[in-house]
Amino acid sequence: MGKKAYDNRELSWLKFNYRVMEEAKDTSVPLLERLSFASIFVSNLDEFFMVRVGSLRDACMVNDNDRDSKTKMKPSEQLSAIYKRVSNLYGELDKAIAKIDGDLADLGVKKCAFKDLSKKEAEFVEAYFHYEMLPFLSPLVIDRRHPFPFLNNAEVYAIAKLSSKNSVKLGVVKALSKTPKALFIPASEKNGKIKYMLTDEILLHFMSDVFTSFKIEEKSLLRVTRSADINTEEAGYEYELDFRSHMAELIKKRKRLCPVRLELSRELSELTLGELTARLELSKKQVFVIKSPLDMSYASAIKDKLSTRTELFFPKRSPQEPYGINPKESMISQIERRDLLLSYPYESIKPFIRLLDEAASDESVVSIKITLYRVARDSKVVEALIKAAENGKQVTTLVELRARFDEENNIGWSKALEEAGCSILYGPENLKVHSKLLLITRRDGNEVKYITQVGTGNYNEKTAGLYTDFCLMTANHEIAEDAAAVFTALSTGKLVEQAKHLLVAPKALQNRICEMCDEQIEISRSGGNGYVAAKMNSLTDKVLIDKLIECSQAGVKVDLVIRGISCLIAGIPNVTENIRIISIVGRYLEHSRIYIFGRDFDKVYISSADFMTRNTTRRVEVACPVYDPDLKKRVAAYFQTQLNDNVKAREQNSDGKYVKVPVGGKEALNSQEFFIAEGYERAEKYREEQAAIPQKKEGFWSRLCKKLFGKKSG
């Protein structure tokens, strides 16, 4: 199998982020949503540099001959390719922002430079600077007695080359992080017109008022991105600190890691730029001059200002009550009758929260066990667990303190849960616990009963309204036994070697997927129609990639819906010609994972695991089979609908590039909009069905007591 069947992980991710930017450029997307996509593109790129570029930089220093297993690129070669591609992406971002600004200006909302203001408007901005900004600034002139300051990660500074009679120096001042990023000019709002200036640009304009004893020779805003590549398993921590304290120390350390990128709002002279890069230990390849704002957080202020202009936003939609789940009946009772499936964000997370609240109070519930990776700031999930512990339930909570950028939040929740009486686990050494698994154990007379929940996404009410995910709830006793084995392994520091129903990484997921692929290969080689399909965020696992290539070469049809990275290239003759890969980027973040085997959808799983090496071999992950025939059909239909998307889908070509799927003569299908409409229709249908059920007539004594005493008889 040729090298051309593989793509580099980092370059594939940059292709994904370009697809995000395409949404910012797409004029069929509401204008302020385009601004949001531009902001998402920037925040995605920030994290990419902090995590991926940071780790590649470290790899360069340790061993630059440690090549990528798929494309054989050295770390230094990958970095060079990244810098070149990112430079081009910034040019595209500048065009996208310029178009958005122009379209906003056509609507009477204008982003101004100081020179664009009238005399009165300029006086207002100047007064604002001197009264609301200048008193709170801490400017620094760099010389022998004032060393170059530490520049915080991802924060904006203004820098200037300063000259006086005797010297030329650099001046640095940090932009005020608590000052609104957009200043709206009151006098401009007559006749519905709005003018605003970015406060970072106001600071830059008035640099001569900050450094009054100097002449400003040149100036720019700048923003440094620092590596976030921390080793959470540094040897020796167990002898000094518990793991929670160890993580708190590492978070502090991360804030001071080395710079990996410098962004500038203006070109600087070779001399000034040389001094800057020397101070920050950066090469010129790591410097990017950008016309777009360095800090995109101003976008939220613009959206708030125009919140009544509904045509500038996606139509308001809310998660609906799921079809067939009675909000007035016990969740445990309903799950014991049949398996239940929630599809976020089209359906509400409330039934799951209700299950937890019910378990917290139900006298028959003995224990609750759950894995927490990312939770909301004001988490109802955690509230229910605390309530359960306070009610005397045995609550075991695995809190993953290594969930990147959520470490501090999770440290806080682990303390709150521990104080409430929950048993806290932190997971095996060197393995993150990424599974979304809940096990509720009940004693019903002499019988032990279980409720198991497996999800594709986090126990987070906020993201459940933004990310597409599945939540399966079942009373299947054998699935519960597998789930119990997972929790036993987690609490004893062991790994699940095999399970009857669940696929459990790192020991019993990758190999099981390969086995099921082999079954489809055998079907094809025997003259049948083998079929493998999967939906995921990313595909990087070389073992699974090679198995999918083997499937293709054996005649197995492979359909993949991959939102982000794909290190596999589809459509290459005699190699991957039977593989199709599409990516959907739209209103909601595609996050659910589905595995399907067989033309008749014989085996259907939902999972927390992408086909990434980190998920399959370096994390505890769980995939759960969908056994209920109706739910299996529903998941399969969901996948097929996404596969048929011809509005937000891009298909990967054999050269690794992604192009919009042509509508052709077919009806336009935006799968996310389809599921939104379906959620509303299913909710309305269920309400109508419930309303049509004859209500039980009230008895004579009950009616009489209500009339006399205002309540039913006892």
Image: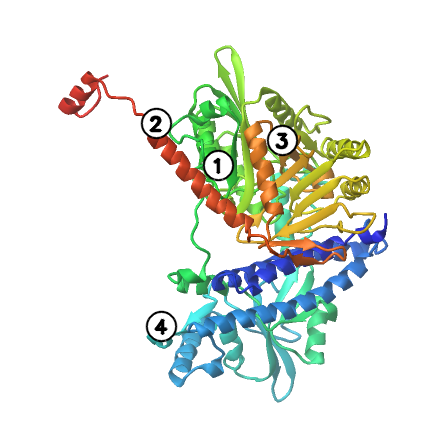
Residue to which mark 3 is pinned: 624
* Residue neighbourhood size for the residue with mark 4, other residues' Cα within 10 Å, grouped as few (<14), some (14–19), many (≥20): few
Could you give the CA–CA distance between mark 1 and mark 2, rounded to whole angstroms? Answer: 33 Å
574 in relation to 709, above or below: below
> Viewed as shown, does residue 79 lie left or right of 292?
right
Could you give the CA–CA distance between mark 2 and mark 3, rounded to whole angstroms? Answer: 35 Å
Q: What amino acid type should be assigned to the residue bearing mark 3?
A: Cys
624 in relation to 99, above or below: above
Could you give the CA–CA distance between mark 3 and mark 1, rounded to whole angstroms? Answer: 21 Å
In front of the other: label 4 or label 1?
Answer: 4
* Residue neighbourhood size for the residue with mark 2, other residues' Cα within 10 Å, grouped as few (<14), some (14–19), many (≥20): few
Residue to which mark 1 is pinned: 381
x, y percentage for residue 54? 71, 56
Q: What amino acid type should be assigned to the residue bearing mark 4?
A: Gly
Which of the two labelled residues, at mark 3 and mark 1, occupies the earlier sequence position? Answer: 1
> Viewed as shown, does residue 689 lie left or right of 368?
left
Q: Is residue 234 visible to the viewer in this orientation of the structure?
A: no
In front of the other: label 1 or label 2?
Answer: 2
